[in-house]
């Protein structure tokens, strides 16, 4: 009975399913997309910094900051599942009656619109820098 139980456990451990989707930094294999995706994220952050003051950053929250950009990739095919850019802002004010600092700090989860079956290579190609 112990042997049977041991074999059953070994079979269950060996049959663990692999992940269907991985973070883009882990595509095509663990950490192999890290530099490429980080370069993309850094360019998006830099471009956001140039664009934001002249567009939607003129409203209530003038100091919107990009936090992280992440994409999921189907590990077997390289097709993107979803990409989300997380942005945050803060607007601290002083309560004149108590002296307390009151902080409004919204966080936005901005999903990137993707065409069906967009492969990560096509995504990188579409977002590569001009002349790059």
Image (spheres, rainbow, N blue to C red):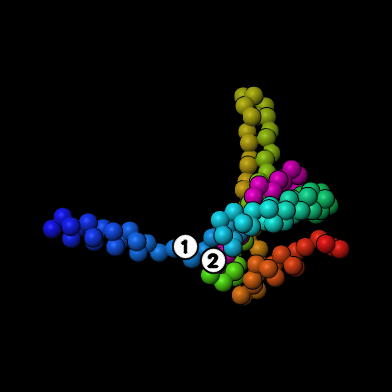
Disc ID at residue 61: none
Quadrant including the C terminus: bottom right
Give whichever of discs 2 and 1 has the lower sequence position. 1
Residue 32 location, x and y as percent? 62, 57
Residue 114 location, x and y as percent? 65, 69
Label 2 crowd (10 A; few <14 / some 14-19 / many >=20): some
The residue sitting at 74% across, 67% down in the picture is 125
Toward the right, the furthest residue is 131
Kind of element beneath mark 2: loop
Residue 95 visible in the current orientation: yes
Disc ID at residue 19: 1
Which corner quadrant of the image does residue 7 belong to?
bottom left
Work out whether 32 lies above or below 76.
above
84 and 12: which is toward the camera: 12
Toward the left, the furthest residue is 1
Residue 42 location, x and y as percent? 73, 50
Toward the front, the furthest residue is 3
14 and 39: which is toward the camera: 14
The residue sitting at 72% across, 56% down in the picture is 40
Write the start and end of the magenta stretch as one range: 59-74
Residue 58 visible in the current orientation: no
Q: Are marks 2 and 1 in contact (CB under 8 Å)?
A: yes
Which corner quadrant of the image does residue 75 belong to?
bottom right
Is residue 60 magenta-colored? Answer: yes
Quadrant including the N terminus: bottom left
Is residue 105 magenta-colored? Answer: no
22 and 70: which is toward the camera: 22
Residue 95 location, x and y as percent? 65, 29
Type of secondary structure dominating the magenta stretch: strand
Label 2 sits on residue = 75
């Amino acid at each position: 009975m112990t042997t049977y139980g041991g074999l059953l456990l070994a079979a269950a451990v060996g049959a663990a399913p692999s992940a269907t989707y991985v973070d883009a930094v882990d595509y095509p294999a663990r950490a192999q997309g890290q530099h490429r995706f980080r370069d993309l994220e850094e360019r998006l952050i830099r471009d956001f910094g140039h664009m934001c003051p002249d567009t939607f950053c003129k409203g209530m929250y003038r100091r919107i900051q990009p936090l992280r950009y992440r994409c999921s990739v189907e590990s077997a095919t390289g097709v993107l599942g979803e990409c989300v850019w997380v942005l945050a802002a803060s607007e601290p004010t002083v309560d004149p009656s108590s002296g307390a600092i009151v902080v409004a700090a919204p966080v936005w989860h901005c999903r990137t619109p993707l065409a069906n079956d967009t492969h990560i290579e096509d995504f990188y190609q579409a977002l590569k820098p001009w002349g790059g």
